[in-house]
Image: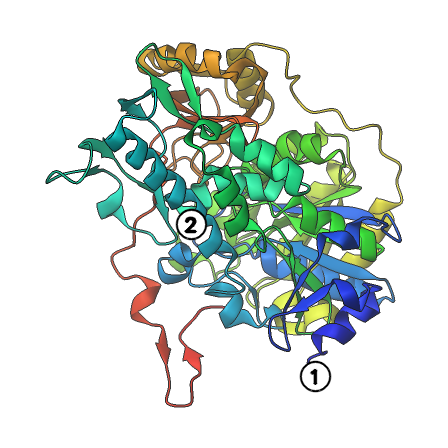
Amino acid sequence: MKEIPIFDLADKLGIDGDFVEPYGRDKAKISLDALKNPPKQGKLILVSAITPTPAGEGKTTTSIGLAQGFKKIGKSAALALRQPSMGPVFGRKGGATGGGKSTVQPATEINLQFTGDFHAVTSAHNLLADAIDNRLYFRSTRLDSRRVTWKRVLDMNDRALRNIIVGCGGNGVPRETGFDITVASEIMAILCLAQNYEDLRARLNKMVVGFDAENKPVFAEEIGVTGSLMAILKEALKPNLVQSVEGVPAFIHGGPFANIAQGCNSVIATKMAMSYADYAITEAGFAFDLGGEKFFDIKCRTADFAPDAVVIVATIRALKMHGGRSLKELTEADVPAVERGLENLAAHIDSAKKFKRPIVVAINQFPTDTEEEFAAVRNFCASQNVACAVANVFGQGGEGAIELAKVVAAACSIPSPEFVPIYPLDVPVEEKLNIIAREIYGADGVTIAAKARKKLEMLERAGAPQLMICMAKTQNSISDDPAKLGRPRNFTISVRDFEIAAGAGFLVALTGEIMRMPALPKVPCAESIDLDADGNITGMLGV
């Protein structure tokens, strides 16, 4: 399909041209003023998935295909998706703009610099780090140099920067610190939760940057550069408008990972999609145990909305891996392996049912799938009273998602009760952790390491008991052990440390061996990406 000029795309949505700020002909920022008098309140659809495997689940591809399917059946739809981080683009993932005939465009720009939002978050975060070290140097802060918690960030996977020493050679106060990846920055989390500039400022001021000699929290407001952070983030707070290959509008904005942060695109972009389309399709990172739970308990609680339906994406290939087959065996038909792997799907369905929304299982079709394998999944879903549809979104785009779109539209028409988060805010932190572990992961509970428990006592002075919980956990298992596929049982979740994100409104519980700065694999995707003589980027997956 021929690309729709960006002003025409916005006009089709009903967005006034005065609110459109073009970045070239194929992408634009949309002014926050476009939300002041929204023309409608569309249905919200959350797309999640089973536990990721190397076989691939295609959650983003399915989200895009579903939106295109809605268009095929004559429904108004818009996407609200996360921006890719360049760390995974050049690392293992290689791109995150969908695939085949269900992609968003311009794919290479979205996967790389896009409109500069990640650069703005990185710059704002590091300006605050710079200002902290400057105050330590001039001794103009009560912050204890041994208790600074604010690190620096970079939008790359770089294991060498996880732990560093700054201030050497007389250039400051020597101290140990490190780098996180940009998507782990609290500023990224705030960007995706803030609903206007005033909210953004208030959240930035509340960020905890460290503690004084008496273990009292020091907030970002005391460092005195919040105004500068606001100036850097001014344009970044505005959502980006692009389109799918079939001309479906897509608001792509923000990108916190779900294994270390809330894993959802911005509240502003989601509200924008809901305000200008009858159906807004959004996603949450990784599987339902990570992104799905956080979408409800963090994003929905903050934004005061809730989805009308939940779609859980599964593939026959991934189910076979959860059923014990190896990656090289997945092209072989194996109904028993699929049936064993359904235990993983069952776990995520059980978790999603806790939020009392209609659930649809989307089987993302691969060429080697068989009708017998599809039947096994359909029969299982029927036994769970859950709708199910096969979608060939990679090979056929919207045409391959017509059945799925019809099933999801029907699910959205089913009334849902008032949304209630899975845990209240006025209970102790440990109780919140246990609720998530038992209700979402199927664990026996949590164990908190002695060091983490001592840290929690210190964080209570910074308001930890009133915060939401953000579990930092491996995406490769429902448990905190990445080797445990399927549906693990008889296990506990081990919390080894806590980090506070008071501005974002949550406490991060670090479990297992999860890292906030990923590393490149032995052979990263960066070794395959290139630019040809005509200026075309090649070798980027999904492009």
Q: Which amino acid type is marked by label 1?
A: Lys
Res 518 label: none
Q: Is there any visible trace of residue 264 in the rendered image?
A: yes
Name which residue lies at 35% across and 54% down. Answer: 156
Q: Which one is nearer the viewer's eye here, 219 or 529?
A: 219
Q: Quadrant of residue 528?
A: bottom left
Q: Secondary structure at mark 1?
A: loop
Q: Which one is nearer the viewer's eye here, 455 or 543?
A: 455
Q: Which amino acid type is marked by label 2?
A: Thr
Label 2 environment density (alpha carbons within 10 Å; few <14, some 14–19, many ≥20): many
Q: Is residue 179 left or right of residue 78?
A: left
Q: Which residue is mark 2?
A: 122
Q: Which one is nearer the viewer's eye here, 205 or 75?
A: 205
Q: Is there any visible trace of residue 361 in the rendered image?
A: no
The percent position of residue 498, horizontal first and vertical second, equals 41, 23
Asked if 541 appears above or below 151 in the picture, the reply is: below
Q: Is residue 443 left or right of residue 356?
A: left
Q: Which one is nearer the viewer's eye here, 412 or 135?
A: 135
The percent position of residue 435, horizontal first and vertical second, equals 58, 18
Disc 2 + disc 1, Cβ < 8 Å: no
Counting the numbered discs, the total is 2
Q: Which residue is mark 1?
A: 2
Label 1 environment density (alpha carbons within 10 Å; few <14, some 14–19, many ≥20): few
Instruction: Indicate which disc, 2 or 1, sits on the residue closer to the N terminus.
Output: 1
Q: Is residue 3 left or right of residue 464?
A: right
* Residue furthest to the bottom: 534
